[in-house]
Image (tube, grey):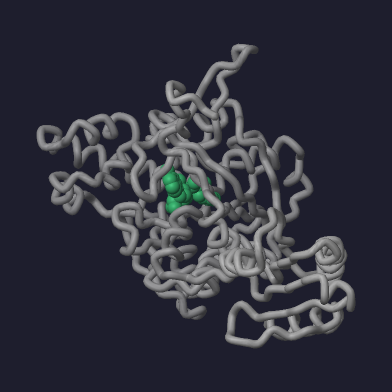
Amino acid sequence: MVSKSIQSIQSIRGMKDILPAEVPLWELFERTAFDWLRAYGYRNIRMPILEHTELFQRTIGEATDIVEKEMFTFVDKEKDSLSLRPEGTASCVRALVQHGVLESGGSQRLYYDGPMFRHERPQKGRYRQFHQIGVEAFGFPGPDIDAEHIVMCSRLWRNLGLEGVTLQLNTLGNPDARHRYKHELVDYFQGLWKNLDSDSRRRLETNPLRILDSKNPEMQSLIEGAPRFSECLDSESILHFEKLQNYLSRNNVEFELNPRLVRGLDYYNNTVFEWVTKKLGSQGTICAGGRYDGLVSQLGGTSTPACGFAIGVERVIELLRLEKKNVESTIDVYVVRQGDSANLFSWQVAEQLRDAGLSVVLHCGGGNFSNQMRKAVVSGAKFAVVIGDIEASASLVGIKSLRQPAEQQSVSIAEAVELIRKGGK
Ligand code: HAM
């Protein structure tokens, strides 16, 4: 017994437990996503969740919200500054460079999944520990891989039965074009210094592009009047972007061009995109990514074009929940049993049903038949297998569907397996 005077320990703010009742939806999502990744030939890579802080400073960027304010960083016993990963792209590139995976010049299609950590202000859809499935492709310079990623995503939303998820698309051009554009933005916003909010003033010094991302309503008219990036774009980037749009149209993927889409991480060039929904309120971006051709060489590898995206799993799960996706229990059989020889026989029956590949829960803890049947129904199992001493002495089992009204039948174990397989379809 826990004494009342001991205060119960709670989880860390913004870090959620995923309880068994929620897990079926997670499993539905994961099964669908892993089949989908296989369908496109992506292979799994697994990186540590802890990295040297410098990795994120150098890749995501010193002047981004993530690195400035949101990392879980600490100094370890060797006096190294370490951070829990706020995202997976930097670690993925670090791993490939460290192990020389890209040195032979071949291409790679990879994915990872797991928890990420950002010390943001928690709210619905925004957590301090959240999960991503990240997809990254290396060694493809053309827009066909950008298009593959976007077409892939639209298939995933379809496979999950999600509706109302739309695509926002933009290009950030090459680094020179971005440099030119930054200068234009600085000139423009400096002229409006008096009207800028404190965040935008700070960003003007550190990361002027991010002013375009401001959510402050008072900044919107100033942002509307800002120079357009399209005026600074280089011709190669324009061509890349046009080809991408062409691929998307030919694959019937609708998109909205959003010249204000700049993304909160510094490593992008050319294509950037976000998949958004109106159903999740202010945290409506469920997936985001783009091209990052400079990152591999920036981390010391041979220059390799790259492109990728990450899905915010909690947000997709919430959408699935809102759309009331029913997830059926995966338990095939709940075995209820009463009587001495029935109890012994039921172990054999349960093991034989498992040999046949079925998922079987053997009732434990006693109780009469009707009590046990109630538990069988609550378990969500498709069938109850009922064993009393009479069945045990004849090596038979009683079988009853828990999904449709049906009489209990007395059958052999082999017949029970057949019935369950047929009824389970
Ligand atoms: P990101 O936009 O920072 O991109 O995150 C991707 C997705 O993760 C977001 O669209 C959102 O769904 C989810 N997400 C982000 N922060 C939170 C949070 N605090 N709570 C819940 N969900 C969150 C990246 O992380 C890039 N690494 C994506 C990428 C991969 N770009 C190229 N390759």
Q: Quadrant of residue 24?
A: bottom right
Residue found at x 47% / y 59% = 317
User: What residue do we see at 86% from left, 68% from top?
Assistant: 352
Residue 234 figure quarter: bottom left
In-image side of 407 versus 348 (left or right): left
Which residue is at the front of the view, 321 or 290?
Answer: 321
Q: Is residue 248 left or right of residue 96?
A: left
Q: Tell me where residue 390 appears, x and y as whole percent.
A: 82, 75
In this rendering, the answer to whether 202 lies above or below 14 is above
Q: Is residue 361 above or below residue 247?
A: above
Which residue is drawn at the image coordinates 85% and 78% (left, top)?
396
Question: Which residue sits at x=59%, y=46%?
Answer: 114
Image quarter (top left, top right, bottom left or bottom right) of the N terminus: top right
User: Exactly how many numbered labels are in the figure?
Assistant: 0
Q: Which of the image's four quarters has the C terminus?
A: bottom right
Residue 3: percent from left, percent from top:
48, 24
Q: Does any portion of residue 324 appear in the rendered image?
A: yes
Image location (x, y in percent) of residue 301: 67, 38
- The answer to whether residue 174 is seen in the rendering is no
Horizontal side of residue 334 vs 152, given as left or right: right
Looking at the image, residue 335 sits to the left or right of residue 255; the answer is right
Foreground residue, 102 or 162? 162
Estimate the x, y position of residue 215 in percent, counting from the top left.
24, 46
Residue, far left: 194
